Image: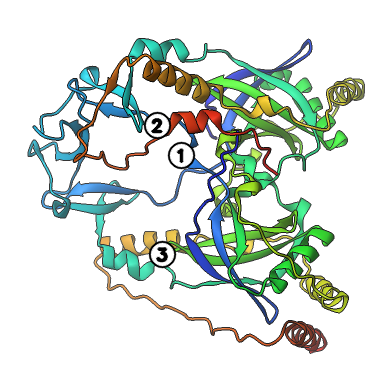
Amino acid sequence: MPETDSPSPFWSGTITFGMVTIPVSLVSATRSSAGVSLRQLAPDGAPLRRQYVCPDHERALEPDEIARAYELDSGQYVIMTDDELDALAPEASHDIELRQFVDRAALSPMLFERPYFLLPDSESTKPYHLLAQVLEATGRAGIATFVMRGHQHVVAIVADDQLLRAQTLRFVSELRTPATIGLPSPPDDLDEAQIQRLRAVIRAHTATEIAESELEDEARAQVLALAEQKLAEHRDVVQVPSDEPGPDAEIIDLMRVLQRSLARPA
Amino acid sequence: MARSIFNGRLTIDDLVIPIKLYSAVEPRPVSFRLLHASDQVPVQQRMVHPTTGEPVPPEATQRAIPTPEGMVVLHDAELAELEPESSDVFEILRFVEPTQLNHQWYVRPYYLGPGDPAHADSYFALARALAAEAKQGIVRWTMRKKHYRGALRAAGDYLSLITLRSTAEVVATESLPELAWPSPTPQELAMARQLVELLEGELDLDQFHDRYAEQVITLANAKAAGLPTTQTPGKPAPASAPSLADALAASIARLQEQDVA
């Protein structure tokens, strides 16, 4: 059940492709709020507030009393100021420079970190369309680095349905391998007949489509349905004083969520 | 040697293959702790009442879902009833083309290892069969009171399982603004294709490093050793914007010159 409010961009910049520049904005291709996030309430119904305390002084701390520290291997803490960390952050840049193109099929989904859509950010959409058409026709992915929110990311740009998509990739150093995990080596004498039997099982269960229901989050639907039922019965509904919106409150309009159409994502 | 995070059984039809699940992602190289600045003691978190400031212990806390009509309280017993039953079955529902799911669906990679290294034949045979058929399996399982969906794929001689988003988490392309498409000319398309071919290469991700993490660790060690700290920023030159055809032609010419040189 993909929901259909249009996502808002949070990064704008240009893709450069040789000397061609393509103004784009990046919008998230996922909806993190789709999970049901339960809020914590006091016995009287007031939404709880998170507080930081010093266990030694046994008292709550003000924000300016809290420091950020990196823990060395020795267990020693080194306090890092915001200024020091800002100075390390790569300089803000609004450029995704495509210097290399690779076979899209060579990108393992193990590398995929976060998916985005790239939308044309200019009246002149011809360069955008050109890159999308060529990437789609050739099955290629453009590889680039770019800076977003103070961090450098490696990104793969691919096209589907004439739409450019950006996929941030994990650094190779972040991924384990069967060797680093310590998985056993495959035996030299795999039973060929067993492989053939398994290939027959795979063929017997191969489908051209994935059933929509197989990718539904049943738990979420059940929690939403229970909440909806309680609302209808006016049971266990607590009014929160309006001058006290909780921190990062995410109000879910249940009826809207439940009634949304089953539009199929591409 | 990484520790497995779950032991289970991969099943389809009558077939049962014991497996262990391992995270394929290393823990983040840089994670910060929050300290009380004056005494350098790690802070603790607690939940307090918003007006009285009194701490509320977890057993007195109610859980609720926010809606426009108010907070709907869900009692622990009700939530417990909705929890999936624990199971060690990783059920393969079907096999599809590896391209059947686009990039948007994949979340987090895991490796599967054989449940018993002494009886690993069926595990390695499945990895070999999946690679030979060039398919991925769609798998469902329950772990730590949560439902998961994943894509089972061959990774060399081994099996990997990558968790998948649910349909509610995936933004439909229909929700994006309509795009009007002026068509590029055949000449522009041909040049763009040529440019892609000139820049074509083998995927080499080893060239990219998490420099920020490396620099944070270097700085932390330097500070701990009492060394002076310096930074060296660099700035790329901004690009100009000629006409599309001119830009393509100039880009191709420049790359061809580099090739000759």
- Residue on which the image places disc 3: B215
Amino acid type assigned to the residue bearing label 2 in the image: Ser
What residue sits 68% from the left and 71% below the top? A125
What residue sits 40% from the left and 17% below the top? A232
Quadrant into which the C terminus of chain A falls: top right
Q: Which of A198 and A29 is in front in this view?
A: A29
Mark 3 and mark 1 in contact? Answer it, CB < 8 Å: no
Quadrant into which the N terminus of chain A falls: top right
x, y (%) of residue A154? Answer: 58, 60
Is disc 3 in the same subunit as disc 1?
no
Q: Mark 3 lies on which chain?
A: B
Mark 1 and mark 2 in contact? Answer it, CB < 8 Å: yes
Which disc is residue A37 wearing? 2
Amino acid type assigned to the residue bearing label 3 in the image: Gln
Residue B178's place in the image compared with A129, above or below, is above
Which disc is residue A33 wearing? 1
Q: Nearer the viewer, residue B162 or B165?
A: B165
Indicate the secondary structure of the residue bearing disc 3.
helix
Q: Choose top left, top right, bottom left or bottom right for residue A217.
A: top right
Q: Is residue A161 left or right of residue B66?
A: right
